[in-house]
Image (spheres, rainbow, N blue to C red):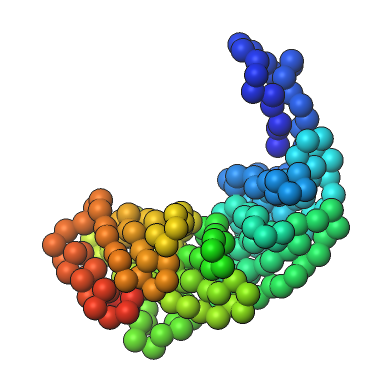
Amino acid sequence: LLCIDPTGTGDVTKTKLVWDYKGIKRSISTVSIDPANGLLFVGDFSGFVHCLDAATGKLYWVHDMKAHMWGSTFVADGKVYVGDEDGDFAVLASSKEKKVLNEVNMGYPIYGTPIVANGRVYIGTNNNDPRDSKHEGDRGVLMCFDEKTGKLLWQLVVPKREEDRYHDWPKTGWSSPVTVEGDRVYTVTSRGEVVCLDAKGMEKVSCCFYTNARDYARFAKLMMNDGNWNG
């Protein structure tokens, strides 16, 4: 992991390197930085979460999730949120000392980055352990939880694409993290569709990209059935 001064020009390999950290293994994650304390958090594919000083690269601690991490860490309200391939969802303290505040197994893989905004936690996964008996089988699932209580507020359950497994890989589920702006939630479903949801319960929905008439009909059903996508 390298920290580079962006003010240089040309080849800055030797002149603008601020610090480097060689303790991280192969990683496909981006870093997250807590502006309140200057701590940097990053996960690696082997399942380790690293906490460093963003200014100096000093290592403070490493936490072993014990499973592959495909997504990134996310920092909000003095906490670090992270998920892994085994379905473990952990909340760590954003501090120089490692503190595990909460950890739970969701029962299904978490490939995307958990997002926290406006008192809600958004986690994408699949339907290995259905929370709604009306939705069985392989599905992409986006769940919204209350940040303080952990209560499930709503979930969006999306059927798999059927024409080619390479368009929607089996058991992979929802991999795209959400983007939240006000009461709007934007994300990409496991079907490759860009959707806009109402954060309070999905009353407003829009969709674009890789859609057809059947998909729009399904979105109409979603709006009529309190977020339950019945196919």
Q: Is residue 211 left or right of residue 134?
A: left
| Residue 61, x across and y down, in percent | 83, 53
For the point 77% across and 48% down, the residue is: 37
| Residue 25, x across and y down, in percent | 70, 45
Q: Is residue 78 above or below residue 39?
A: below
Q: Given the current orientation, which residue lies at the most extreme bottom position?
A: 133
For the point 32% across and 58% down, the residue is: 195
**Residue 167 is at least partly visible in this image:** no
Q: Is residue 208 above or below residue 84?
A: above
For the point 63% across and 75% down, the residue is: 148
Quadrant (top left, top right, bottom left, bottom right) of the C terminus: bottom left
Q: Is residue 16 above or below residue 28?
A: above
**Residue 215 is at least partly visible in this image:** yes
Q: Is residue 223 left or right of residue 30?
A: left
**On the image, which quarter does residue 147 sit in?**
bottom right
**On the image, which quarter does residue 185 sit in?**
bottom left
